[in-house]
Image (cartoon, coloured by chain):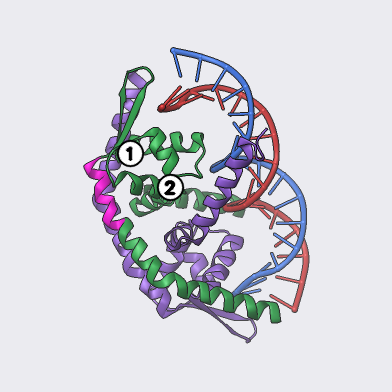
Chain colours: A green, B purple, C red, D blue
Amino acid sequence: MPTRTAAQLREEAAREYDAFLASCPARQLLDRISDKWVTLILTALADGPQRYSDLSRRIAGVSQKMLTQTLRSLERDGLLTRSVTPSVPVRVDYELTPLGETLMPLIASIKTWAETHMPQVNAARETYDDVSATA
Amino acid sequence: MPTRTAAQLREEAAREYDAFLASCPARQLLDRISDKWVTLILTALADGPQRYSDLSRRIAGVSQKMLTQTLRSLERDGLLTRSVTPSVPVRVDYELTPLGETLMPLIASIKTWAETHMPQVNAARETYDDVSATA
DNA sequence: CGGGATCCAAGTAGATACTG
DNA sequence: CAGTATCTACTTGGATCCCG
């Protein structure tokens, strides 16, 4: 009997890999911007500072919970600032930080690739699905 | 009583928004590449064609299920090809398509942003967490 | 107005066992 | 070798109600 079973070895490898992925900057970035609402919020804020209710209206499909949650996480990451004006009723403005703005060109290049190549991808999907259906 | 309740209106808005997001090329692309294993597989294949077992070894943390599932979806999208050699035992090779290769520069720019700016993001996180803990 | 707290439904990934 | 099939556990997001 080995000191460690095969199952234990596999588990260990998976843990190490998780650690590797967690420390990988590119992975972290992808996790961040791939969030459903992140790019929408960032793009909306690229037009300038906006209030919570403005964002809520522009990004029509988002729930209060997800909007708040996403805004908080972006604030935490230093990508936007949250400023509260303690009037009655309260007013909260969100604004991109310089760091947040550096992200915009990247989002733009993602958009460009998407507009250029996604039609091909969709065409490939249809072909694939047709063949599968025939078989 | 209105012909449609507030809840119904909200539901309708959410559906429309879902449809909008589903048809948005940039959203589709992000959904595709943000998958945990997609960029790993694509990057591995950038070195040239590889067998299933090669990929499985290089991407140590992936389960058989996810590797197969991800490879199939990438094949469906026309980003890579799957070729079976009916020997005994079977041999299956995966290879990037030209379309798949066009994705590599984009992945590279994501990597570049990440390496340049993620340290700042992480620093912002620590500051944010410290302040929260103090408060 | 701008949330916080809670509950719940649904999709998703991993482990395990089996196969042409 | 290169998968498929199934079951379970966990994560996630929406709905709802409440508050300063």
| Horizontal and vertical percent position of residue A15 | 49, 48
Q: Is residue B46 magenta?
A: no
Range shown magenta: A97-106
Kind of residue at disc 1: Asp
- Residue at point 33% right, 39% down? A77
Is B125 situated above or below B88? above
- Residue at point 46% right, 73% down? A119
Which quadrant of the rendered structure holds the N terminus of chain B? top right
Could you say which disc has been placed on residue A77 in the image? Answer: 1
SS of the residue under disc 1: loop
Could you say which disc has been placed on residue A66 in the image? Answer: none
From the image, give the main secondary structure of the stretch colored magenta.
helix
- Residue at point 44% right, 79% down? B97
Left or right: B106 as drawn, with respect to B5: left
Is A105 situated above or below C4? below
Protein chain holding label 2: A
| Horizontal and vertical percent position of residue C10 | 67, 47
Judge whether residue B109 can be spotted in this image. yes
Give the residue number, with chain letter if any, for mark 2: A19
| Horizontal and vertical percent position of residue B132 | 35, 23
